[in-house]
Image (cartoon, helix red, strand yellow):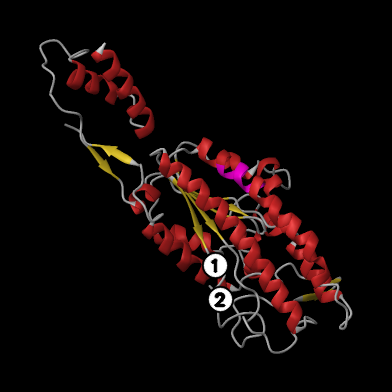
Amino acid sequence: MARVAVAVALGVALALACLPLGVLPKLACAVLDAGCPDGAAPAGRLPERVRLTPLQAAQSGAYVALGDSYSSGEGVYDLDRKPVNDGADRCHRATGSYVPLIAGTYRFAGGTAFYACSGATIAQLFTGQWGQRPQVTRVGPATSLVTLSIGGNDTGFTRVLTTCIAKLPWSSACVDQDTAVGRRIEQLRTDLLKVLRELRGRAPGARIVVLGYPRPFPEDPVSPVDNLGVDDQRWLNGVTRRLNDTVGSVVRDFDRAIAAFGGPGSAEYVDAYEAFTGHEVGRPQPYLNGLALDTDPFKVNARSYHPTGDGYRRFAELVSAQIAAGPGRPLGNFRPVAP
């Protein structure tokens, strides 16, 4: 009975540690004196394992970049001269995004796959856009790092911003959207959790890094910008804060669950709210494009209120720092050491 109990304990430990199956016979030989090769005596100790550092865990496989326009590079797409990959013209994936910068900073054993798509909602991560495969299907067992920005389109930020800009100067149409926006932000809790579960199911050992959104206007705006009064700017800043807080809360709760069970991988949130401080829209050197208009035909250019090249480089700094630092707790990712 004692050996049975030990065997059960070993099976549970093996599942939690996600060790390769080939390690099990060695465990049985060392601890149970069973399954040893002919003439071999049990070693008397378990095979050694080395816990991976956050950077080692991130680089051990493939880096897959998912998300919306803040990850695809919408704000600098018009400046691009060569497509990143198939479908880049529809999804506005640009070489000026933070993703290629991260790929050039670190060496990922499985390479880099860049599939963020402008306009993506959480639903479209599962259904795909422009006839392309759903973004979540790009993640697999060999994925060791996922970066993701999502939620802005679910909140309807582009539509909200357009309403604010197109209103009459004395109208309160901008801030009148508050109740509807609040409902959409709250819905994100359920929807984002579904995304994290899906990604973890596909890549149980991956680090999932979720990037928040920057505050678009100065903390204390003093003058109108793009027909947005001071109160409008403060409200839009507040919407961004609420969106970030919701996303960050879901990600942190998910990571606590991973840690509680001692599982590999992580879910990590990068709060970018203050990332562009001093470089908001209306400042001399903004990291966000302001309102951009096309004249033929007359329409708002999609790069409006998306990061500039400097903005994406700032994002790259934040993501790179997170990759190196990790989730602030020991990871449950291990590498067996050969005897």
**Toward the viewer: 185 or 206?**
185
Residue pointed to by mark 1:
272
Q: Residue at x 67, y 59 (%)?
A: 92
Residue 271: x and y, percent? 53, 64
Q: From this viewpoint, is residue 158 visible?
A: yes
The span shown in magenta is 191-196
Q: Tell whether label 1 touches label 2 (CB within 8 Å).
A: yes
Residue 82, placed above or below residue 254:
below
Does 78 appear in magenta? Answer: no
Disc 2 on helix, strand or loop? loop
Residue 8: x and y, percent? 33, 19
Residue pointed to by mark 2:
276
Residue 161: x and y, percent? 77, 70
Compared across the picture, whether 148 is left or right of 61 comes to right
Magenta stretch prevailing secondary structure: helix
Q: Residue at x 56, y 63 (%)?
A: 95
| Amino acid type indicated by mark 1 | Ala
Disc 1 on helix, strand or loop? loop
Compared across the picture, whether 270 is left or right of 61 comes to right
Q: Quadrant of residue 155?
A: bottom right
Q: CA distance from mark 2 to mark 1?
A: 8 Å
Compared across the picture, whether 305 is left or right of 22 comes to right
